[in-house]
Amino acid sequence: AAEKELPDAYFALAQLYEAGIVSGYPEIGKAHSWLLKAAQAGIDNAQVELAIWLLNGKGTEKDPKQAFQWMRQAAMRGNVVAQSRLARMFAEGIGVQRDRIEAAKWHIVARRAGLTDAWLDEFLVGLPKKDFSTALSRANSWRGS
């Protein structure tokens, strides 16, 4: 299937290589190559996974800025996990300039989709009213787009 250029197959192959199912032992380099192909083809779950690999230096050098870019792409595609993780990246300044309002916006978007995060909930509680209002407005605008 991967030879026929089916992006979902790229992601499946990445998972198979990572788990060691193909050869009996994990092949992280091959897994990373297929994961990158899947992410580049627009598979949002692959983009999230690649971002996590980049944050942890799995199969590649640690690269928080690149991780942020992949997480953002997945979030923009509507991936709720990515939206929540992007909120955390903005809140902590991981791979991006710290931005409390963008962090709150993405957390609100993810919460509306049903994903909760106690740390981010606590983060929202500490946000000044004006910042929360701005974040809420941005979340409403994003949801409508």
Image (spheres, rainbow, N blue to C red):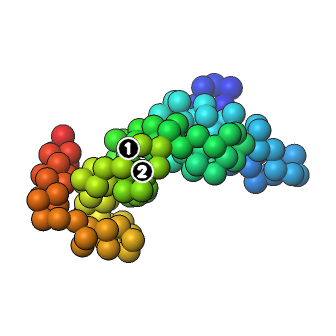
Which image quarter holds the N terminus?
top right
**Mark 1 and mark 2: span between their CA atoms?**
5 Å
Residue shown at 14% from the left, 46% from the top = 141
Residue nearer the viewer, 73 or 130: 130
Q: How many numbered badges does the structure rendering display?
A: 2
Category of crowding for the residue at label 1, using alpha-carbon neighbours closer than 10 angstroms: few (below 14), some (14–19), many (at least 20): few
Residue shown at 22% from the left, 65% from the top = 127
Seen in the picture, residue 60 relative to 25 is either above or below; the reply is: above
| Left or right of 132, for residue 112 | right
Residue type at mark 2: give it. Answer: Gly
Give residue 121's position: percent from left, percent from top: 31, 71
- Pointer 2 residue: 93
Label 1: state its secondary structure. Answer: loop
| Left or right of 87, for residue 44 | right
Would you say the residues marked 1 and 2 are in contact, meaning their CB atoms lie under 8 Å apart? yes
Give residue 66's position: percent from left, percent from top: 52, 37
Residue shown at 76% from the left, 44% from the top = 28
Seen in the picture, residue 11 relative to 79 is either above or below; the reply is: above
Residue nearer the viewer, 10 or 65: 65
Give residue 62's position: percent from left, percent from top: 63, 43
Residue shown at 17% from the left, 65% from the top = 128
Numbered tag placed on residue 97 in the rendering: 1
In the figure, residue 109 lies in which quadrant? bottom left
Label 2: state its secondary structure. Answer: loop
Give residue 120's position: percent from left, percent from top: 35, 67
Category of crowding for the residue at label 2, using alpha-carbon neighbours closer than 10 angstroms: few (below 14), some (14–19), many (at least 20): some
Is residue 80 in view from this perspective? Answer: no
Residue type at mark 1: give it. Answer: Gln
